[in-house]
Image (tube, rainbow, N blue to C red):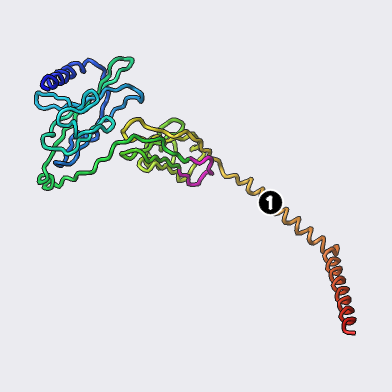
Amino acid sequence: MASRRLRLLLLGYLGVFCYHKVTGIAIETDNKNVKAEEFKEAILSCKHKFSKGMSLRIEWKKIQSQEVSFVYYNGEFTGDLKDRAEMLNTGIRIRNVTRKDSGTYRCEISAKSEEGQRLGEATITLTVLDKSVASSFKIEILESKESVPPTTPICVVPNSAMTGTVVELSCKEAEGSPPSEYQWYKNGVALLEKTGTGSARTANITYTMNKKSGTLIFNTVSKNDTGEYFCVASNGIGLPQKCSMKRMQVDDLNVSGIIAAVVIVALVMALCGLGVLYAQKKGYFTKESSSQKSNSQSTSEKDFKHTKSFVI
C-alpha cells in the first residue's frame, strides 16, 4: 500500500515537471472557489474544448502545501474518494464531503495531436463548512445538476415575408445543462445582440436578438433582411451545436397586382349584372314564370275534375 502511494506521488511530481514542455490549451471551470456544507455533496467542474473523438487522458490531483496526491488516475478514484466520488464528464462529484476534503484540486486533461502532446489544467479550491458556520453565513447550497452539452437546436425561420411586417425567428434546444445561450447568424456573419449602435446602425438593420430565449425579432422587416439564417446553441459544455441554414425572402407588397385583381373582380361582377339586365329585357325570366304559372293552372284543373268525379 505504501509503495503504491509512493509510486502515485512520484508520478504526480513527474507530471508537474513534464507538463511544462507540452503545448497548452484552455481549460475552464464554472467555479474556482467551491463552498459546500459538511456531509452534503460538492461539484468540481472542469471543461475542455478538445474535438469530439479525441483520446483524452484525465487526471485529478489534490495539492496540499508541498504534497501532490492523485484523486483520479488511470480511470479510477483513489484514497478517501474511491467510494465517494464519480465523474461528471471531465468534472467530479464528491458525496458526503468532510472538512478533510477541503483543499486545492487540479484538473489536468491531455490529448495527443499532430503537433504533439497537448495539456490544459484548471485549479479549484474546495472549502467544506460545518452546519453551524454554513447557517451563520447563510450559505445557500444549490442542488447540483449534471453538466450536459447542448443538442442540435430547432430553428423556425419563415420562408417569405412582406416588407414592413413583424417577423419572428426562434431557436431552442432543451437538453443542455446549464441552459444554452443562442447566437443568430445571417449569411455566416454573427448578428449583434443590441441594435441601434455600431454596425447595426450603419447597416440600417432593425431587429432584437435575445440570447437567453433564442428569439430574433424584426419589428419592421425590409428587403435588406433577406438572407440565409442559422442559430448556434452553446452552454460551455462540449461543442456548440447549430441548426441547418434556412433562407428568408423578403419582398415588397405588390400594390399594382392587388389593384389589378380588384379591377378584374369588379369587371366580372359588372358583366354578370349586365347579363341579368339583358335577360330580363329579353323576357327570359318572364317566359319561365308564365310557363310555371300555366303548368300550375292545368294541374289545378285536373285536380278539380278528379275531385268532382269522386264526389259524383
| Image label count | 1
Q: Quadrant of the C terminus?
A: bottom right
Q: Quadrant of residue 64?
A: top left
Characterize the local packing of mark 1: few (<14), some (14-19) or many (20 or more) Cα atoms within 10 angstroms. Answer: few
Helix, strand or loop for disc 1: helix
Please tell me whether residue 71 belongs to the stretch shown in magenta.
no
Please tell me whether residue 167 belongs to the stretch shown in magenta.
yes
121 on left or right of 253: left
Query: Is 125 or 299 nearer to us in this picture?
Result: 299
Residue 237 in view? yes
Disc 1 designates what residue? 263
Q: Residue at x 42, y 31 (%)?
A: 189
Query: Is 40 or 201 nearer to us in this picture?
Result: 40
Residue 106 in view? no
Specify the farthest residue to the bottom: 312
The percent position of residue 140, horizontal first and vertical second, equals 19, 45
Q: Is residue 273 above or below residue 299?
A: above
Query: Is 43 or 231 nearer to us in this picture?
Result: 43
Q: Residue at x 75, y 57 (%)?
A: 272
Give the extent of the magenta segment.
Answer: 157-168
Q: Is residue 16 above or below residue 248?
A: above
Q: Quadrant of the N terminus?
A: top left
The percent position of residue 126, horizontal first and vertical second, equals 16, 34
The percent position of residue 156, horizontal first and vertical second, equals 47, 41
Q: Quadrant of residue 295?
A: bottom right
Q: Residue at x 25, y 30 (%)?
A: 46
The percent position of residue 231, horizontal first and vertical second, equals 42, 36
Q: Is residue 293 above or below residue 121?
A: below
